[in-house]
Image: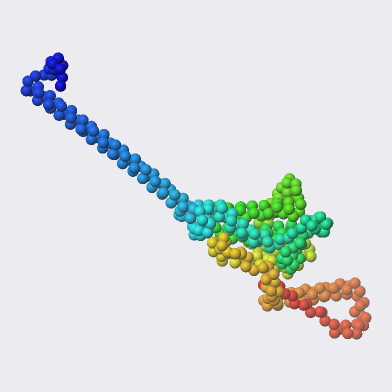
């Protein structure tokens, strides 16, 4: 309730009469309606904003889940993913968990490399080195103690660093040929990992086994070894394409150091074993490269019976050719002797000379 003076002042401000009162009521009703509409719009805006916020959060969570699913599919070798083949990577991912392809390749290639490096391994103990019992070749290469490998026992290769390196590179080449059947990225990754394992152990052998403490000298030898590895790959690839004769020449130059007194029988057995190993690796599934306990089913000496097997198809050709050459040699020698001493025909022939016959050429065995 206002005082008389306030009421009189308010009366001066407000219009009087029924029409004015109705207009005032309509204005107040309009203002009240506008206020309620504004309040309702504000509440609906807040509700819409909250709903939009919840919806955006839901969309973000769905997008993050979708991205995570995509990454998981790529890791497992989904469609459109790079790297290994789909089924191969799925199996490798299931074996190695959530690891990436590089870690999978590292573990698998390490196991494969150990299988390659143990074939012609050797040791030189510090006790032998201190006692001066380490022998050397004519070229000054230290000779260690072999592990009873057929490369040392059957084929006569000395247990040296050179023998170990070339036998290991030979096995690595067989694996690399099989890895070429994979896609480009997988082949590059797996071959790089295999080569890294090889050169890491090569440097370790130089340091621990041969007491080569100078890092500069080790790097120099590793550079030369890398050049040899590139040459070995090219030489064996050429032999793989051109035939066994070229392949045997590559093995003779690298593994046997072009020795003139090489055992040809052992050389033929190694070439036959390389062919059979490539065939066995070719028949193996891609997943077998990572899961199979060994990639080399047979040993090279198992091919010796194949080398010693006589081939009936060559019997007539070799004996006739050798016999004909022998007869031609005898006749040519006889004609030369007759020209040198023409009176020899007048002399009496020694007793039993007419009954002498050329010696039969012995049959030889050749590889199949």
Task: Classify residue 36 by image quadrant.
Answer: top left
* Extreme-left residue of the structure: 18
Q: Nearer the viewer, residue 115 or 244?
A: 115
Give the residue displayed 15% in from the left and 19% down from the top: 2
In this picture, residue 314 sits left or right of residue 109: right
Q: Let me know if residue 66 appears in the view.
A: yes
On screen, residue 324 above or below 123? below
On screen, residue 125 above or below 314? above
State the quadrant of the C terminus. bottom right
Give the residue displayed 91% in from the left and 83% down from the top: 350
State the quadrant of the N terminus. top left
Give the residue displayed 64% in from the left and 58% down from the top: 113
Q: Position of residue 319 (x, y in %)?
A: 74, 76
In this picture, residue 63 sits left or right of residue 327: left
Across the whole image, how many numbered discs are drawn on residues? Answer: 0
Colour mapping: rainbow
In this picture, residue 24 sits left or right of residue 263: left
Q: Let me know if residue 253 appears in the view.
A: no
Q: Position of residue 148 (x, y in %)?
A: 73, 66
Q: Position of residue 84 (x, y in %)?
A: 52, 55
Give the residue displayed 50% in from the left and 52% down from the top: 82
Q: Nearer the viewer, residue 32 or 148?
A: 32
On screen, residue 107 above or below 279? above
Q: Position of residue 226 (x, y in %)?
A: 68, 51
Task: Classify residue 170 by image quadrant.
Answer: bottom right
On screen, residue 192 above or below 249? above
Task: Classify residue 341 by image quadrant.
Answer: bottom right
């Amino acid at each position: 309730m206002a005082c008389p003076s306030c009421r009189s002042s308010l009366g001066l401000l407000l219009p009087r009469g029924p029409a004015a009162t109705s207009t005032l009521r309509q204005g107040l009703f309009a203002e009240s309606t506008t206020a309620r509409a504004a309040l309702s719009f504000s509440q609906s805006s807040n509700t819409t904003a909250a709903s939009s916020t919840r919806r955006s959060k839901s969309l973000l969570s769905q997008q993050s889940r979708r991205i995570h699913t995509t990454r998981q599919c790529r890791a497992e070798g989904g469609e459109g993913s790079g790297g290994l083949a789909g089924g191969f990577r799925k199996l490798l991912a299931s074996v190695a968990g959530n690891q990436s392809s590089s870690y999978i390749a590292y573990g698998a290639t390490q196991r494969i490399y150990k299988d390659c490096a143990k074939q012609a391994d050797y040791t030189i103990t510090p006790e032998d080195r201190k006692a001066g019992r380490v022998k050397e070749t004519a070229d000054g290469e230290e000779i260690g103690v072999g592990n009873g490998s057929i490369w040392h026992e059957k084929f006569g290769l000395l247990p040296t660093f050179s023998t170990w390196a070339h036998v290991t590179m030979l096995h690595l080449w067989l694996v690399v040929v099989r890895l070429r059947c994979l896609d480009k990225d997988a082949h590059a990754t797996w071959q790089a990992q295999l080569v890294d394992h090889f050169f890491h152990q090569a440097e370790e052998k130089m340091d621990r086994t041969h007491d080569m403490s100078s890092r500069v000298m080790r790097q120099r030898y590793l550079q030369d070894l890398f050049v040899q590895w590139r040459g070995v790959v090219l030489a064996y690839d050429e032999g793989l394409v051109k035939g066994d004769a070229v392949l045997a020449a590559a093995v003779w130059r690298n593994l046997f150091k072009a020795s003139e007194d090489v055992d040809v029988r052992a050389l033929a057995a190694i070439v036959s074993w390389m062919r059979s190993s490539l065939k066995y690796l070719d028949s193996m599934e891609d997943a077998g490269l990572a899961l199979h306990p060994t990639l080399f089913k047979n040993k090279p000496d198992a091919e010796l019976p194949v080398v010693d097997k006589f081939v009936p198809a060559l019997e007539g050709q070799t004996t006739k050719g050798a016999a004909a050459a022998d007869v031609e040699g005898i006749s040519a020698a006889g004609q030369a002797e007759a020209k040198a001493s023409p009176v020899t025909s007048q002399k009496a022939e020694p007793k039993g000379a007419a009954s002498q016959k050329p010696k039969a050429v012995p049959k030889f065995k050749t590889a199949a």
